[in-house]
Image (cartoon, grey):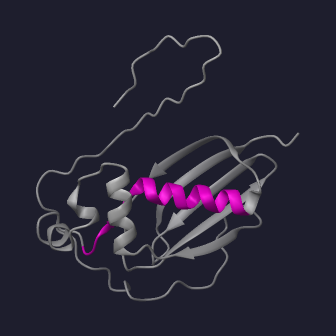
Amino acid sequence: MRPRKRQRPPGIEHVIDQQNLPIAHGPRQVSPHPHATRTLPRVAIALQPQSIETDIDPAPPLLFRYSAVTFNAHRIHYDLAYAQRVEGHPALVVNGGLTALFLLEHFRRVAGAEPASLRTRNRRPLYCGRPARLSAAGEGAAWRLRAENEVGETAVEMEVEACSVP
């Protein structure tokens, strides 16, 4: 989806959200990963020389609430039977926007700054009930963040330019 060009009134700031959404047709054949119940290993993720990490495990009520407040009616986020039987997912799918919010809050905690700009890329889904790891590394205003699934595969990448501190 590409935003239309708009004339911006002087002195008015706004955000343009550009999304490229992959659309799946028909049920997917997805089998549970053999290591799905394994906990994440405690190793450093080499994004940059020093990475700050935290683990998350979103619960079904959070996915339901996030879907409600964002008016996202896609049942893969709150209806387990539908997600598994119709869409072929092994569990409820964590919304990519929610993962981006987790990454953004992780950035705010570790950088102690607000973002001036950010860019995200969703690579693969995270699943409810499976641990995920958030990693952040940065120097100065440039930061790279990543959310990984339980086996260390990148689910969401984020690049953040921090606001300059006065």
Q: Residue 103, how many percent across, how many down?
A: 57, 59
Q: Residue 117, how many percent across, how many down?
A: 63, 39
Tell me what residue is drawn at x 47 percent, y 60 percent: 99
The quadrant the N terminus occupies is top left
Considering every residue shown, the one lying at the far bottom of the view is: 38
Q: Residue 155, how many percent across, how many down?
A: 45, 62
Q: Is residue 33 left or right of residue 137?
A: left
Tell me what residue is drawn at x 56 percent, y 85 percent: 41
Q: Nearer the viewer, residue 136 or 41?
A: 136
Q: Is residue 18 left or right of residue 92?
A: right
Q: Nearer the viewer, residue 31 or 2?
A: 2
Q: Is residue 24 left or right of residue 155?
A: left
The quadrant the C terminus occupies is top right
Q: Residue 18, how many percent across, how many down?
A: 43, 33
Region in magenta: 90-109
Is residue 91 magenta-colored?
A: yes
Tell me what residue is drawn at x 58 percent, y 68 percent: 134
Total numbered labels: 0
Looking at the magenta stretch, what is its main secondary structure? helix
Tell me what residue is drawn at x 33 percent, y 85 percent: 34
Can I make out residue 94 in this image? no
Is residue 75 magenta-colored?
A: no
Can I make out residue 81 in this image? yes
Q: Nearer the viewer, residue 34 or 18?
A: 18
Q: From this view, report whether residue 126 is shown above or below residue 141.
A: below
